[in-house]
Amino acid sequence: MKLHRVVVTGLGTVTPVGNDLETSWTNLLAGKSGVAPIRRFDATGYASAIAGEVKDFDDSDYLDKKQARRLEPFTRYAMACTRMAMQMAGWNPSDVEKERFGTIIGVGLGGLRTLEENYDALIHKGPRRVSPFMIPVLIANMAAGQSSIMTGAMGPNYCTTSACASGLHAIGAAYTDIKLGRVDAMICGGAESTITQLAVSGFTSLKALSTRNEEPEKASRPFDKNRDGFVIGEGGGLFLLESLEHAQERGAKILAEVVGYGASSDAFHMTAPPEDGSGMALCMQSALKEAGVAPEEINFINAHGTSTPLNDKCETTAVKKVFGKHAYDISMTSNKSMIGHLLGAAGGVESVFSVKTLMEGIIPPTINLENPDPECDLDYTPNVAKKRDVEYAMCNSFGFGGTNCSMLYKKYQG
């Protein structure tokens, strides 16, 4: 079986620091936080009343007003990112090409807003007041479905749902399909919007969220000694991936190459990783092995870096396990310090930013790293962006249920 090289030709993102790629990237490099008091609902009395919300998003360029009213924000973000990625790639597929073009978009929780609204209608107004659109709007695969309808993609069309690793697993699945020759191109990544009363209450009860409400822009502080939990965020980040042959035949500008995918399980606990970071280490090792890349060749990792006490410590331990002494020469960053944790969208958004680092040779900072945790003693690019030539970018995502994923991207060199 012939294995195909897989390349990135389009990027699209909507985040708490910008509604397009360049705005998001500029603000990320400047260390600007998108975390603020929750505006989506009245969070008075909530232990955690802050979030990384998408601000002033106008989707009129991507869908009509009637359609927008019937769709959950996560689906609308995915459609916007799809359009951005296709426009960047400069590709309008023919009818024949559409048969070998698919969409795989990871979503962790799906349409909680719609679920809450319709449950409230059921309880207070009766079953006849439940919307006929409830089910098709809230289901998690609607992001991939609507992106498929928008582009006419007739290949694989599905959703990966693996908690906070959903977006990165979607990229891994799309990469594998193209590599094996099943398709020529895929829209892939993640989208999420669950800043709702139920989700915030649930994560708060789990004691997973930061309660630093008085300083929202400083609440997400990965690897800092005083971190107290993650900040919930929303948005989307998608790639257009193509086989190298397909991209070259149409004269596409190639942004980066995808060279490794690793997935593993902690097989340990519902929500907590093992302290030795063994599952996290295994997926990083798998990505390196698939790419045929030695650990010493890696000099940048876009960390999962959630700002929870256990995750940051375990990820640091796992990186040391994989890279040994070389771990101290690797530049790391956590985008979540500025955008919060986008749950199922995290891996997609952070992959987009990883490719931008490969393209521009600039590593975004981990902001709010003011009092380093002695147990987190690697180079997390504290507070200020750093220029560094990067050939390989590793991106990590880990989720509840012990699911782990690592993707390895390479600067394209022909």
Image (cartoon, rainbow, N blue to C red):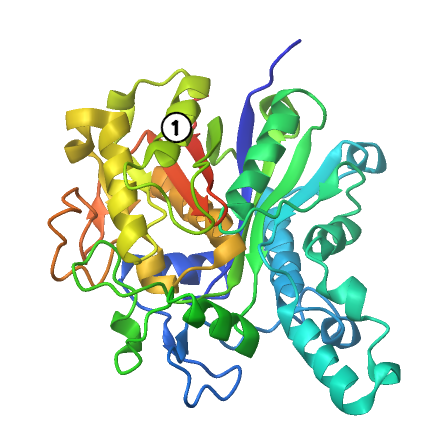
Residue behind mark 1: 282
> Which residue is found at the position 57% from the left and 56% from the top?
191
Depicted 273 relative to depicted 241: above or below: below
Report the residue that reaches farthest toward the front: 269
Amino acid bearing label 1: Leu
- Residue 376 or 387: which is nearer the viewer? 376
Residue 351: quadrant of the picture: top left
Depicted 6 relative to depicted 330: above or below: above
Depicted 4 relative to depicted 209: above or below: above
Q: Position of residue 32 (x, y in %)?
A: 30, 67
Report the residue that reaches farthest toward the top: 1
Q: Is residue 131 left or right of residue 327?
A: right
Q: In this view, does 213 lie to the left or right of 81?
A: left
Q: Where is residue 83 in the image (x, y as percent from the top left)?
A: 64, 54
> Which residue is found at the position 41% from the left and 66% from the top?
17
Q: Where is residue 74 in the image (x, y as percent from the top left)?
A: 62, 63
- Residue 411 or 338: which is nearer the viewer? 338
